[in-house]
Image: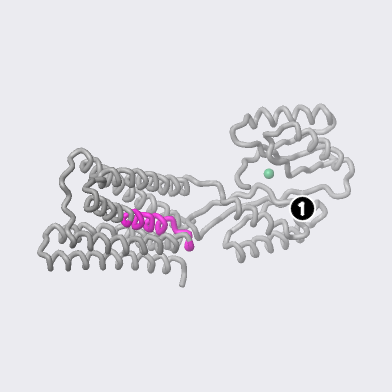
Amino acid sequence: MNRSKQIVRVSIIGILANLVLVAFKSAVGLITGSIAVILDAVNNLSDALSSVITILGTKLANKAPDKKHPYGYGRIEHISSVTIAVIVLLAGVTSFRESLDKIFHPEAASYSAVSLVIIAAAVLVKFFLGRYVKAQGEKLSSESLVASGTDASFDAIISLSTLVAAGVSLLWGLSIEGYLGAVISVVILKAGLEILLESLGSIIGARVDSELSVKLKDKVTSYPEVKGAYDLILHRYGPEKTIGSVHIEVPDSMTAREIHRLTRRITEEVYMEFGIILTVGIYASNTEDETAKAIRESVEAMVQDYPEVLELHGFYVEEQEKRVSFDLIVDFGNDAEGIRNSILERVSSQYPDYRFDVILDSDFSD
Ligand SMILES: [Zn+2]
């Protein structure tokens, strides 16, 4: 079963679990003749909303790419988790307001046996539902499912707090529901905000997971002809579509035909193994050139004086034209331009016969 089908199945289980709860509450409401319980049951229908949004988001995200959106619609999944985050935040605000109301306008709470049984059922259903949905969401790397599972878990915690408050009230005659609710509301608001920021971060474009970029670079450098892999850039269009590029360093003795064969193989095997469409760019590295080696070593030693420089790569000397080129990656938050110029000045004065091209690259990935 593919990923989106699994997400839809988990969401349907979420909807069903909520419907079972609604049915249970309605039945109890009808049997005891309590309109309040029936209204509460109807109100509970909205808890299935996050699952409905997850299904809609998954369906839309799976639309085939077209001329207007050639990268597909995968990022819609982030929009649906933003929506669910808003639902979680609203739940937090509502519960906080109700808690304050209970603190400032305390009413003698009357916990009937019926209502306690209903709350206990809700705790059980939501607890297991929340755990299940969240675990599946992590397995399927679905932000929406994780958000939806978090939503259900918080429903369980809120209901549990009502049970605890009822117990305390019955045993010691203390009313703590408002205070308990206020604390839990703050936790919910924090969680909602975290989900919101993470989903928004994915839409804005976040740094690639370090584990993935290191694995990918290891893969690319596993070919014997590849002397190094740099400037790995990955664009994600939803969890299932990633497009990117990388620069590889190869000996300048290789022919176009050999490079063609090598880069094709890398692209193909990376796609097979990671499902990532990777474009490969080329840096040449000097072979059998003692001057180039000497210049490189002294430039590398000089760059050691700049701790802000994270990487030096793409070093190449064209001896006939007396040109040297290399790339620098300067850590974010530094005056990259100034550092580049300072290094350029120093290498130019040390090797006045050569022209240096120093390119500034961005620290896109680990
Ligand atoms: Zn570069």
In reply to whether residue 147 is colored magenta, the answer given is yes
In x, y percent, where is residue 128? Answer: 37, 64
Q: Residue 316, percent across and down?
A: 78, 43
Q: Main secondary structure of the magenta part?
A: helix
| Residue nearest the observer in this picture, 229 or 20 | 20
Q: Is residue 198 left or right of residue 234?
A: left
Horizontal placement of 157 versus 218: left or right?
Answer: left
Q: Residue at x 49, y 55 (%)?
A: 237
Q: Which residues are magenta?
A: 139-156
* Quarter of the image where ligand 1 sits: top right
Residue 150 screen position, x and y as percent: 38, 55
Q: Residues within 10 Å of mark 1 (few under 14, many from 20)?
A: some
Q: Residue furthest front?
A: 172
Query: Residue tagged by mark 1?
Result: 227
* Residue 100: quarter of image: top left
Which residue appears at 43% of the width and 65% of the height? 4
- Report whether 184 appears left or right of 363: left
The amino acid beneath tag 1 is Lys
* In the image, residue 62 above or below residue 184: below
Foreground residue, 58 or 90?
90
Instruction: Determine if the C-beta at disc 1 is less than 8 A from ligand 1.
Output: no
Residue 135 picture location, percent across and down: 44, 62
Q: Residue at x 83, y 36 (%)?
A: 298
